[in-house]
Amino acid sequence: MIQFPRIIFIHQPHIGKGGLQLIDKRNIYVLSQFTKELITVELSPYNPKATNNFCIKLYNRLRMFLTKNVDCKAILENLQTEKENSLIFISHSLFGFYASNLRKKYNVNSKIVVFFHNVERDYHRNNLRQVKSYSNLQSYLLACLSEREVVQNSDFIIALNERDKALLVERYGDLNIGLLPTSFESRTIQRKFLKNERLKLLFVGTYFLSNKDGVEWLANNIAPYVNVDIYIVGSGMDKMKKQLSLFSNIHVFGEVSEAELEHYYLEADLFISTLFFGGGMKTKVAEAMMYGLPIIGTTETFQGYNFDISAIGLKSNSPQEIIDFIERVDNNRDLLEVYSKQAREIFVSDYSFDSSVMRMEAILESLNK
């Protein structure tokens, strides 16, 4: 197995809970298999001075946009001349100014690998379309410039799925780019589906635009037409409690502990994710598969998951198809056991940490060719 004397992992501050933190945690574990010295450096690309003052943050962003200059001291102090073969792993495409400064200003020779959680240019463009504000415009322009800089100044790019890879190639031309899908640490799971109780459906996600839209669609198009209980769980989701109180079979909970979240996964019969826009991969799908949960999801939900979805549940954007599927498994609970077993097997094979280590090994070996 290829080894680096030192790997420097650059990441954004982990505030709250969400897919970014989970993927960063996964990447740290995977990279630790290829070095005896992994150093994490926390930086804030859009707020380098770490201030909560809105005006100062806007000024810092404008200054960054115009000068492209950022403070790389925290990175440089971990690079030593005798360790020139170190690897710099940038965990987000918003760190483009750091990549360009390391290459052009400081002439760093270490290999630079950049991980794209999604294509930020598209993500911020969608935010700008939804809410037209100076702050969103500035974020969009910074994302465009940052991604261009990071593409031009890295040795290898890692994307989560084929869609993001195709977008990057379309925009920036031929790139050294590979795929490292979402994955989770495997656990031993004991679950049992109860045949005589009302079905429990679980939606997990933090409160932001895509999830909010998905929950509203679920409430309006599915909840009134099925005899099930639907649990909505995630940081900030309790903001929707009043709005969803009109639906007697929807139960809303905000942020929960890891132990409580595991309880929800183990108590549920089906995982449901009705998303219609976004980027990257939906980490909760892999997490649900790890727990052996059958899954109902939309086309967007399953972006990046390359297997026959019918083996673990249903992929559909049609309300009627989703309603019919729920009724079918409700009337034949043995199907839940079949989907559960297959979800777990696919998870272990393709979306566990062990599978990611093998993918990362191939990526890192390509750097030395």
Image (cartoon, rainbow, N blue to C red):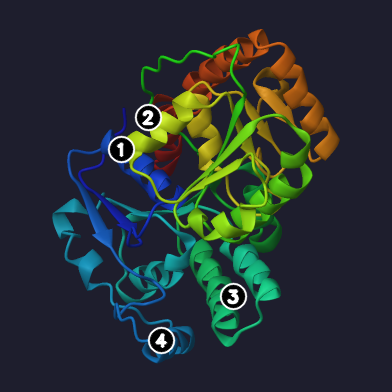
Does dot 2 land on a helix, a strand or a loop? loop
**Residue that label 3 marks:** 140
- Alpha carbon distance from label 1 to label 3: 31 Å
The quadrant the C terminus occupies is top left
Q: Which label is found at residue 29?
A: 1
| x and y, in percent, of residue 315 in the image | 74, 32
Disc 1 and disc 2 in contact, CB within 8 angstroms = yes
Q: Earlier in the sequence, mark 1 or mark 2?
A: 1
**Residue that label 2 marks:** 185
Residue depicted at 76% across the width and 22% down the height: 327
Disc 1 residue crowd, few under 14, some 14–19, many 20+, Cα 10 Å: some
- Alpha carbon distance from label 4 to label 1: 35 Å
| Res 260 quadrant in image | top left
Q: In screen coordinates, is 82 left or right of 266? A: left
Instruction: Please state which of residues 13 and 111 is positioned toward the viewer in this rendering.
Output: 13
Q: Earlier in the sequence, mark 4 or mark 3?
A: 4
- Alpha carbon distance from label 2 to label 4: 38 Å
Disc 1 and disc 3 in contact, CB within 8 angstroms = no
**Residue type, numbered disc 2:** Glu
- Alpha carbon distance from label 4 to label 3: 17 Å
**Residue that label 4 marks:** 54
Residue depicted at 55% across the width and 82% down the height: 138
